[in-house]
Amino acid sequence: MNLITFIAALTALISLILAILAFWLPSLNPDNEKMSPYECGFDPLGTARLPFSLRFFLIAILFLLFDLEIALLLPLPWGDQLSSPLITSFWAAAILFLLTLGLIYEWLQGGLEWAE
């Protein structure tokens, strides 16, 4: 029981020290760049009617699409404990195949090109 108490106290102490450092260090020398809000590359003090880059929006949507579909593969390690892990591997391979086909299609259509 003494070891568990020591580890819990040590963990709490390290967490407290890191939290204090995180609040204390940034306030040592603040400047205008650090204190200004960052709004995805846009000037937050300018007009709100600036044209929005559609290319940036499409690449962000593609990133979200592929990122969320990769989340379908997260249960894969637990699928090995099923009665037939071959079925789990088949579905994982099918998802990866569809993601690869989608990536190749977007690449060939030029959807991943940032500048023309």
Image (spheres, rainbow, N blue to C red):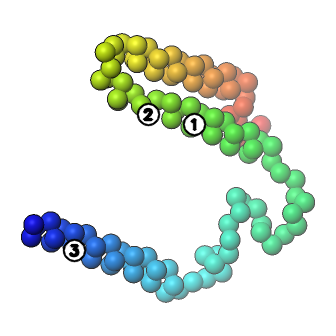
Residue under label 3: 9
Residue furthest left as drawn: 2
Q: Can residue 115 be seen by looking at this rendering?
A: no
How far, Cα to Cα, is label 3 from label 1?
39 Å
Which mark is nearer the camera, 3 or 1?
3
Which element carries disc 2, helix, strand or loop? loop
Give the crowd class for mark 2: few <14, some 14-19, many >=20 residues within 10 Å: few
Which residue shows up at 87% across the image and 53% down it? Answer: 51
The three-letter amino acid code for the residue at tag 3 is Ala
Q: How far across and down, in percent of the image, does residue 105 sit?
A: 67, 21
User: Looking at the picture, does residue 100 appear above or below residue 23?
Assistant: above
> Residue 81 occupies which quadrant of the picture?
top left
How far, Cα to Cα, is label 1 from label 2?
11 Å
Query: Could you say which is closer to the camera, residue 7 or residue 47?
Result: 7
Q: Earlier in the sequence, mark 3 or mark 2?
A: 3
* Label of residue 15 in the image: none
Q: Quadrant of the C terminus?
A: top right
Query: Could you say which is closer to the camera, residue 12 or residue 110?
Result: 12
Give the crowd class for mark 3: few <14, some 14-19, many >=20 residues within 10 Å: few
Which element carries disc 3, helix, strand or loop? helix
Residue under label 2: 74
Q: In this image, 91 relative to 9: left or right? A: right
Give the crowd class for mark 1: few <14, some 14-19, many >=20 residues within 10 Å: few
Residue under label 1: 68
> Residue 60 occupies which quadrant of the picture?
top right
Q: Earlier in the sequence, mark 3 or mark 1?
A: 3
Which element carries disc 1, helix, strand or loop? helix
Query: Could you say which is closer to the camera, residue 12 or residue 113?
Result: 12
Q: Earlier in the sequence, mark 1 or mark 2?
A: 1
Q: How far across and down, in percent of the image, does residue 20 sit?
A: 39, 81
Residue furthest right as drawn: 49
